Amino acid sequence: MNSDIPLTSHFSPSTPESTAPPDRQRQKPHFRSVFISDVHLGTKDSKASQLNDFLKLHRFDQVYLVGDIFDGWRMRNGIHWHKSFNRIISRVLKISKNKVPVYYITGNHDEFLRKFANSRFENIQLLNRIDHTTADGRRLLVIHGDQFESVTHCGRFLKLIGDRGYDLLMFINRVINRFRTRYGYGFWSFSGYLKDHIQRAQRYIRDYEYAVSHGAKRQKYDGVVCGHIHQAAIKKIDGIDYYNTGDWVESCTAIVEHHNGEMELIHWLEHPLHFEMEKMRNQKLKRKKRKTLTESA
Ligand SMILES: [Mn+2]
């Protein structure tokens, strides 16, 4: 009868009529580690509220922020600050207060932080790179990845379109999606479409993946976790485990490590918990609308 489905019901099908207060903290999906990058806080396109949902509905033993969390470049041309950005910051602080180590690895868009590397704020460590040992004993290099870009010579997609061109693309993307959501279609990524279809972009991605993997191989790692190109992936490249976290500007992806060391790519916009959250939000909105309608009647 009650349309307000508690989020915890998803995880405890065996105790549907439990009268005990739901221990949300215990029932949240729990991972050993999470890797997130390219949130670009300070820009219009940052999907901070989606990321906030994702962080709120999971539990982690350690958190790796793999660069470009803030976008210092764009902020120079005027800050776009949204309240959801504050929520991300307070959520990360809250996570770190719960004795969860947070590793903030700098990216090229937040390179203003690079000179403060190796400093520490309570449980948050600021670093330019770090080693991570998985539960199954593999040594991974965790790094944003732009450091390897000079190795790739051909087809720099993002440079090709240029920062201004990219802004225009994202603007077109927003306009299209405003109409799509108005008429009940899902979110559609214009630049995602382009990226998939421009051969040069594909070559750029392949070169980048290869350069990063070989960099890690030269330094005797078993694998690498990076971000930077906004193209999430889990693959094996010349014996190296390559993990790319993707981004929270369009695709809303993260890499998580299970307790046995298995790594998984999460597409948040296709996740059942995300749909549950959206459903609850829509119902809340409808109730609010109904309330204001009856009040004004
Ligand atoms: Mn980057």
Image: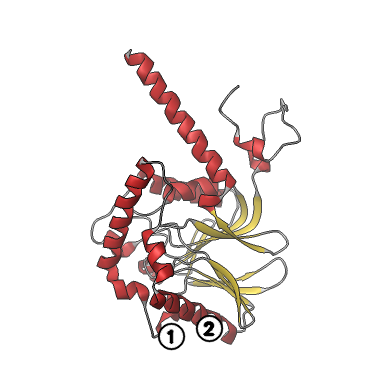
Quarter of the picture holding the N terminus: top right
Instruction: Kindly identify the amino acid type of the residue bearing the numbered disc 2.
Output: Gly
In the displayed orientation, state which residue is furthest to the left.
Answer: 77
**Residue drawn at point x = 65 percent, y = 55 percent:** 31
Query: Is label 1 in contact with label 2 (beta carbons under 8 Å)?
Result: yes
Other-residue count near label 2 (Cα within 10 Å), few / some / many at <14 / 14–19 / ≥20: some
Looking at the rendered structure, the kind of residue marked 1 is Val
Q: Quadrant of residue 167?
A: bottom left
Looking at the picture, does residue 224 appear above or below residue 32? below
Q: Is residue 171 above or below residue 160?
A: above
Please indicate, yes or no, whether residue 4 appears anywhere in the rendered image: yes
Q: Is residue 280 left or right of residue 20?
A: left
Residue bearing the label numbered 2: 215
Mark 1: few, some, or many residues within 10 Å (few <14, many ≥20)?
A: some
Is 69 placed above or below 224 here? Answer: above
- Please provide percent x and percent y for residue 89: 44, 50
Q: Is residue 57 visible?
A: no
Q: Residue 45's x, y, as percent?
A: 35, 54
Alpha carbon separation for disc pair 1 and 2: 10 Å
Callout 1: SS: helix
Q: Position of residue 174 (x, y in %)?
A: 32, 52
**Is disc 2 placed on a helix, strand or loop?**
helix
Classify the position of the C terminus by image quarter. top left
- Lateral position of residue 66 relative to residue 5, left or right: left
Report which residue position mark 1 lands on: 151
Q: Which is more N-terminal, label 2 or label 1?
A: 1
Residue 94 image position (x, y, % from top left): 52, 47
